[in-house]
Image: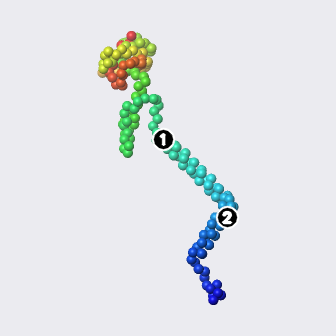
């Protein structure tokens, strides 16, 4: 009977399963003791390089997704909405530089010869009639503009710092002294 039992295929029960697990564990241990193979190291190095390339691409995409203002200012208007295509007719964001206000005035061609950069200017603001605002001529356009037959030159007046509550777009008049 013992001879016949030895000749028959083994019992595939819990003992056989446990032996297979021991053999697998021994093979894994032997592999760890042997250290990494050259191919395994090379694969790991390539995976690291691939991850670095993905990181650089993500950083580049992030930089391209940011809108950076060329100066410190206040956002006056946002003409973009999430999920909508941008309009080519309007700027995406309108910034206002409130650190320095200026006034562009048209000076008649007869008077422009008497205007020089640096001249003092007295400015009256329609919305703030009691405010005393001074300015200086910052620049004079090199070429004239003609509107309905009247020739004039654009002159930019740089307003001096003031306590008056100035806002962009206020109507004002400048008297060049």
Q: Position of residue 162 (x, y in %)?
A: 40, 18
Q: Please tell me how crowded label 2 is: few (under 14), some (14-19), or many (20+) other residues with Cα within 10 Å.
A: few
State which mark lies toward you, 2 or 1.
2
Would residue 122 be found to the left or right of residue 36 on screen? left
Identify the image quadrant of the N terminus. Answer: bottom right
Q: Position of residue 90 (x, y in %)?
A: 37, 36
Q: Position of residue 40 (x, y in %)?
A: 64, 58
**Picture layout, residue 92 above or below residue 130:** below
- Residue behind mark 1: 64
Report the Cα–Cα distance between label 2 and label 1: 50 Å
**Picture layout, residue 88 above or below residue 11:** above
Identify the residue at horizontal 64%, vertical 55% (top origin): 42
Identify the residue at horizontal 49%, vertical 44% (top origin): 61
Residue 166 visible somewhere in the drawing: yes
Closest to the observer, 24 or 43: 24
Label 1 near label 2: C-beta < 8 Å?
Answer: no
Identify the residue at horizontal 58%, vertical 73% (top origin): 17
Identify the residue at horizontal 32%, vertical 18% (top origin): 128
Would residue 128 be found to the left or right of residue 21 on screen? left
Secondary structure of residue under mark 1 = helix
- Residue behind mark 2: 30
């Amino acid at each position: 009977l013992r001879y016949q039992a030895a000749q028959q295929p083994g019992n595939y029960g819990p003992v056989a399963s446990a032996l297979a697990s021991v053999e697998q564990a021994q093979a894994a241990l032997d592999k760890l003791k042997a250290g990494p193979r050259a191919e395994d190291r090379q694969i790991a190095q390539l995976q690291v390089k691939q991850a670095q390339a993905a990181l650089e691409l993500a950083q580049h995409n992030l930089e391209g997704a940011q809108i950076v203002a060329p100066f410190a200012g206040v956002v006056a208007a946002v003409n973009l909405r999430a999920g909508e295509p941008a309009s080519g007719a309007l700027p995406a964001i309108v910034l206002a530089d409130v650190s320095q206000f200026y006034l562009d005035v048209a000076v008649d061609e007869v008077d422009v010869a008497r205007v020089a950069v640096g001249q003092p200017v007295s400015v009256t603001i329609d919305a703030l009639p009691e405010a005393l605002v001074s300015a200086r001529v910052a620049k004079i356009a090199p070429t004239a503009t003609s509107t309905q037959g009247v020739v004039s030159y654009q002159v930019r007046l740089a307003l001096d710092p003031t306590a008056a509550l100035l806002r962009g777009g206020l109507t004002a008049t400048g008297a060049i002294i």
